[in-house]
Image: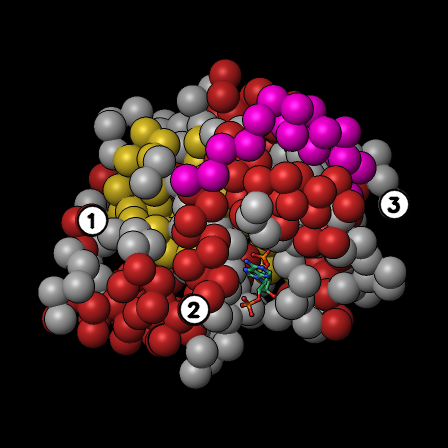
Amino acid sequence: MLTFSFANGDRLPALGLGTWKAAPGAVYTAVLEALSIGYRHIDCAPIYQNEAEVGKALTKAFAAGQVDRQELWLTSKLWNGSHGPEQVQPALKKSLTDLGVDYIDLYLIHWPVIFKSGVTYPRRADDYLPFSIDSLSQTWQALEACKTAGLVRHIGVCNFSVAKLRALQSEAGIRPEMNQVELHPYLQQNDMLNFCRDNGILVTAYSPLGSGDRPAALKKAEEPILLDNPTVVRIAEKHGCTAAQVLLAWALARKTAAIPKSVNPERLQQNLSAAELVIDEQDMADIAALDRGYRFVDGAFFTGKGSPYTVAGIWDERRD
Ligand code: A2P
């Protein structure tokens, strides 16, 4: 398996299993199946409401000797309602307990969005706290302390714009080592990739297949279906593989890790095998032309009535 190296030499398996939207009841078997066919990177978060079930599968796999903890890469994330510095270690420890492990390989601030302490889903204006780099830096210091305490091996962020990465970096003792962001041919984010490469930040692509199974409330009308894109389908036909495999091979060719979600054994295998697929320069050029700056996960769910957040503000883009 292709890996990407952190500064200390630790290696992240490039193709991981996404668990967002993997339903309770399905994620246990999906994780066991994934581990049995060779996945060694599982991406988790407490907000996915399934970490305890992922943990049951891990405990079973460890007990059966199917995989050693040291050969498995586990990522988890800090939710928006746990940004208070005193809340960070308890939130992390809850993930450790749920996952049944004593350290996490990579711990990420899930969003540059801050809720009042303890809020899971905001319902009222005062469930939100305004964004500030100062506040985020204090959260970050608490992550640094978790790293120093050996509870996590690496720390980073998700959904951070270049502007926010810059601001956090300038305050940080330990610099962010990862930015996990939405990446696929419709949202290629080349400036982001260049910035991260120049600053020693690894990048993970989430929703690499276009996240077609998001709940209706999180979907816009008339969303494009990435897996049906004619260029992607044509390249798949050329290589005798599937559209999903082309999307994943493209992500890995750009030196980004990718975490496709699947709970289906055949698709789990298909996605893992994509790590062996090589697409050529012409394919890369054809896919480069598909960029349209389109976000499936645009953060609009944080911009409800009374919220101080806007889509443009989250991404530091001129939108809205
Ligand atoms: P399923 O879990 O039934 O396999 P993303 O990772 O971009 O969020 O996309 C996840 C969606 O893509 C899910 O609906 C998942 O369904 C589906 N999916 C995962 N792997 C494949 C594949 N190889 N081919 C087609 N659809 C896939």
Q: Quick check: can you spot residue 309?
A: no
Q: Are marks 1 and 3 in contact (CB under 8 Å)?
A: no
Mark 2–mark 1 CB contact (< 8 Å): no
116 left or right of 39? right
The residue positioned 48% from the left and 70% from the top of the image is 264
**Residue annotated with mark 3:** 320
- Name the image quarter holding residue 17: bottom left
> Is label 3 in contact with label 2 (beta carbons under 8 Å)?
no
Q: Which residue is mark 2?
A: 265
Count neighbours of disc 3 (C-alpha within 10 A) and say few if under 14, some if 14 to 19, many if 20 or more. few
Looking at numbered disc 3 in the image, what kind of residue is underneath it? Asp
Three-letter code, disc 2: Pro
Residue 10, located in which quarter of the rendered image? top left
- Which mark is drawn over residue 71? 1
Q: In terms of sequence position, does the residue under pointer 2 or pointer 1 come before the other?
A: 1
Task: Say which label, 3 or 2, has the lower sequence index.
Answer: 2
Instruction: Measure how far apart labels 1 and 3 are at the Cα level.
Output: 44 Å
